[in-house]
Image (cartoon, grey):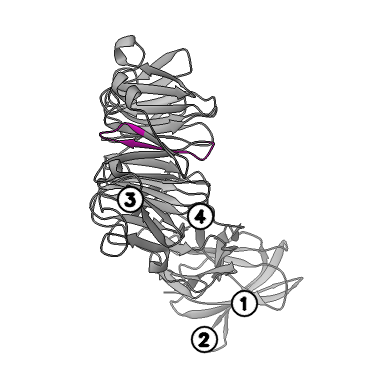
Amino acid sequence: MKLKTSILLCLLALASLVHSQSWSVYTVRSSEIVGDDIMAVAADSKGAVWVGSTLGLCRLSGRTWTDYSMFNQKLKDQFINCIAVDKRGVLWIGTDDYGVFEFNGTHWTEHPKEMQKYNMALIRDIAVDQDGVVWIGVTLSGLVRIEGKDWKKYTADQGGLKSDFIMDIAIDKDNAKWVATNEGVSKFDGSRWTSFTTTNSKLPIGNVPAIAIDRKDVKWIGTIAGLCRFDGTDWQVFDTKNSPLPDNQINALCIDARGAIWMATQKGVAVFNGKDKWQVYNAKNSKVPNAAVRCMMIDQKGTKWFGTQGGGLVRFDGYGVKGRVVDDKGKAVPNMTVRCGTRTTTTDAEGLYYFELPADAAGEITLATDATVEPTNYTFNNLNGFLFVKDFSVSTALVAKGNSKEKVVVTPYLAEGYITISLECPTAEVEFVNAKGESVRTLPNYKNGAKITIAKMPKAPYTLYIRTAKGEKSLQFNLK
């Protein structure tokens, strides 16, 4: 029985889309960006994007680039490893040779005495907590806390902090600091330290370049051996062997407004819904270059920014929508046409389809088919993050058509040699008519859901008539 099926994805306020329009790449050849080796990216309160590279600091405001080494010569050819913005809108800029800079938009503040006192070369990460306190991770010299004019340093020698090699810092809902190091993760609640290592947790390795915390306070820990999920009790590990993760080394993590986890890896960018659905962006399906992705940021508008090693800065201002179509046995339905406005694609061998839509897209996803589909539709109001759509299940059941409003569904079980008919009425008259218009079989008192054996019927095309108290419906099928 041949089933003609297609998916119609209807969207309101959807302009014509071109895949490449969602992606932009800034390199020294195509823009005035300062360097193609991007180390850090952050957005300020006005929406300007600040980019740190191995050659200095620059800003993208609208379409205009500004090289800030023109205003501060110490930034010229300087590694800018991290950038953070505090509650006042002040930029904190971590460098290799000059420690940390503050910039309020007009005035630069340096801390040469503190840099020398606390050995603050090679700044790796900067985080601002809920109280506005600044926490600075130094590559080989521990964690520095700055609250106004008060500075304090935490090192492994003092106890608590697992290692002085700080790689990333994240703040949880209780304002506790989670510090990623080369020997595991250390949590600091303001008075007590707790460390998680390969010996007392399911961390696959001690080297942890990245950590992020979602709205449910789940910790997502990026290691050089895969991604870890830690909810405070249980651990899960995702790597290239048990997931579509493109590479085990995770360099940066972000959480979007829908709760999807974005990962910058050595082989592109991965997005994960936290359970079982993934999307990977690389040179084959996007403008992410064939280079390591070192850093990333999601701005207030939901635009994603990826800093690469040698490939410049990549901007993605579209929103991914990914779904899957399966049959009633859970098997993938490949080569199915999927339409989104004027755009068309097909499901792949795994039944997956993917679209990139604008942020203001809103609408209803439906399947236009003669078969039974669950769910019948999926409605969304906006795309403020990556949308992983619930699976559509396409049944082999066929919907009969006719002059009544009653829903009549015929489900074939060809391997077992029978069909069933789902009715709203308790009984019906069922008639099989051949291609010549001859009645070859009649069941005058068919009961809803009962089996009708067809194994011994001649292989031929038929029209099936189903007559109930509400009217008549029919269905054409070919018994092969």
Question: What amino acid is labelled 2 in the image?
Answer: Ala
**Which of marks 4 and 1 precedes in the sequence?**
4
* Image location of residue 278, percent across then percent down: 39, 49
* Secondary structure of residue under mark 3: helix
* Image location of residue 329, percent across then percent down: 45, 54
**Which of marks 2 and 3 precedes in the sequence?**
3
Question: What amino acid is labelled 1 in the image?
Answer: Ser
Where are the magenta residues, as a range? 87-100
**Mark 3 → mark 1, Cα distance in angstroms:** 78 Å
Instruction: Please report the residue visible at 31 percent of the width from the left and 39 percent of the height from the top.
Output: 81
Density class for disc 4 (Cα within 10 Å; few <14, some 14-19, many ≥20) is: some
Density class for disc 1 (Cα within 10 Å; few <14, some 14-19, many ≥20) is: some
**Which of marks 1 and 3 precedes in the sequence?**
3
Question: What amino acid is labelled 3 in the image?
Answer: Met
Residue at the extreme top of the image, as rendered:
158
Where is residue 364, by image quadrant? bottom right
* Image location of residue 301, percent across then percent down: 52, 53
**Mark 3 → mark 2, Cα distance in angstroms:** 84 Å
Q: Which mark is residue 389?
A: 4
| Quadrant holding the C terminus | bottom left
**Mark 4 → mark 3, Cα distance in angstroms:** 48 Å
Q: Which residue is mark 3?
A: 70
Instruction: Please report the residue visible at 38 percent of the width from the left and 68 percent of the height from the top.
Output: 20
Q: Which residue is mark 2?
A: 435
Q: Which mark is residue 42?
A: none
The answer to whether the residues at label 4 and label 3 have Cβ atoms under 8 Å apart is: no
Q: Which residue is mark 1?
A: 474
Question: What amino acid is labelled 4 in the image?
Answer: Val
Residue 92 on the magenta segment: yes
* Secondary structure of residue under mark 4: loop
Query: Which callout, 3 or 2, points to the residue nearer the camera?
Result: 3
Query: Which callout, 1 or 2, points to the residue nearer the camera?
Result: 1
